[in-house]
Image: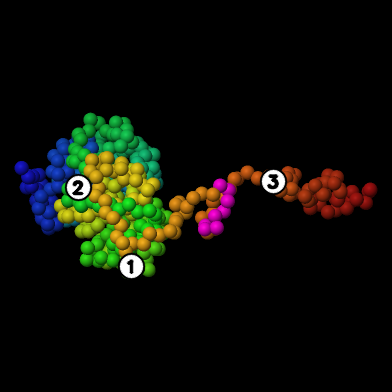
Amino acid sequence: MQVTFEDLNLSKQLFNAIDDLGFEKPTPIQAEAFSVVRSGKDVVGIAQTGTGKTFAYMMPILRDLKYSVQQHPRVLVLVPTRELVLQVVEEIEKLAKYITLRVEGVYGGTNINTQKRAIAQGTDVVVATPGRLYDLALSKALNLKSIQKLVIDEVDVMLDLGFRFQLLNIFEILPERRQNIMFSATMTDDVDALITDYFKSPKKVSIAVSGTPLDNIAQQCYDVPNFFTKVNLLNHLLKDKETYKKVLVFVAFKRSADLLFASLDNSYADEICVIHSNKTQNYRIRSIRQFDEGMNRILVATDVMARGLDFEEVSHVINFDTPKFPENYMHRIGRTGRAEQEGHSILFSTEKEQEHKAAIETLMDVEIPKLSLPEEVEISKQLTEDERPREDGEISKNRTKLEYVPGPAFHEKSEKNKKTNQGGSYRREIAKKYKKPKTRGDKNYNKRNKKRK
């Protein structure tokens, strides 16, 4: 039997907000988590990305969050990136359209004093990245003594990014009596350890096994010899604007993202944008907004930057690099085929990446259909730094000075560098000439001693 929003015992205000958004029925994770979160027990939710996790924890929280004029927040939501802070705040505001609720998002990379002033006005829900939250708590600008519910979203990414230390510090300054709610796309050993140490007999809500491909996503793959042939193939595919209407391209590293963006910029200058952690906050927000609103057709992104972001109507996810961890492939392809729409995923793999592709297929228990390279795609002979053979202690003529790989670090010191530091030469010369001057600036004393000799 299909669960409806009427079955969830929502308040009238929540029901009206959901009706305005045009949602007809809850997703499986929303239906399963609602009563568990409302029970007040600790909750661990495991669900694939793109399944509506934000509403899954916020609907039951807002259902029971009473109006209050108190200054300090009662709900804390932790997320790994600044972009997710902005998105979660926006989702909460949509859901709380008919509720009197104060929501504040805080994150690094912006003026902390502005955020302190906003928090001083009073807030009910704080959405934050761990680092900035801890800074605000330490400076006593943010008081966490009233927190009743702690939500940690995308916790596996948070731990991957090295936020474990900040999380443990935050746990120490939160009230002991609170409800812990954790949502993750994968259950790793680190996530399991965190649950064991800080959760009290948590109830687990799991929707789909990690690695199960979403049924409404058509998957294909190409075997490609090198980076620049991948560029040629991608360029060939993107020329078909009718098919590739809204394309999210994933790469493994920031350097690869910049190189790919530079390679495509001449052909798609007005259609392409890029996000990774080295870009400024304003640039990233603008790129995300322009892609989401359809102003840009192509977005090049690294895994961390696009994790958890909710883009509407992405026609294709192209895995320019084959991810080393097979779970990341699942997170990537979850950007398309959202809200039960049909999606498409394409995977590029070099010979070195075949092992990673095999791990993905093993995890999903599915063989991804392989396509032949189109005849129009030129096989490039140009290689990136990582693809070139390494010369031991030699400088390749093909490398620029930025790509130079130095030889052995040890070498004999030159004669001038064998000298030892004996202090300033002035002291030594004065001591030799005048024996022991009273001070090096006492000229009269030095003259008197000289006359006596």
Could you tell whether 403 is left or right of 124 in the image? right
User: Is the magenta region chiefly helix, strand or loop?
Assistant: loop
Sequence-wise, which precedes: disc 2 or disc 3?
2
Q: Nearer the viewer, residue 59 or 157?
A: 157
Please state the extent of the stretch shown in magenta in the rendering.
392-399
Q: What residue is drawn where x is 28% and y is 57%? A: 248
Q: CA distance from mark 2 to mark 3?
A: 62 Å
> Pointer 3: what residue?
413
Q: Does the segment drawn in magenta span residue 68?
A: no
Q: Nearer the viewer, residue 345 or 121?
A: 345
Across and down, in percent, residue 132 comes to 37, 48
> Pointer 2: what residue?
214
Across and down, in percent, residue 241 comes to 25, 66
Q: What residue is drawn where x is 10% and y is 50%? A: 25
Q: What residue is drawn where x is 60% and y is 45%? A: 409
In the depicted structure, whether residue 31 falls above or below residue 447:
above
Could you tell whether 10 is left or right of 369 in the image? left
Task: Say what secondary structure mark 1 lies in.
Answer: loop
Image quadrant in which you'd find residue 188: top left
Dot 3 amino acid type: Lys
Q: CA distance from mark 1 to mark 2?
A: 30 Å
Specify the quadrant that holds the N terminus: top left
Task: Say what secondary structure mark 2 lies in.
Answer: loop
Sequence-wise, which precedes: disc 1 or disc 2?
2
Count neighbours of disc 3 (C-alpha within 10 A) and say few if under 14, some if 14 to 19, many if 20 or more: few
Dot 1 amino acid type: Tyr
Across and down, in percent, residue 389 comes to 49, 50
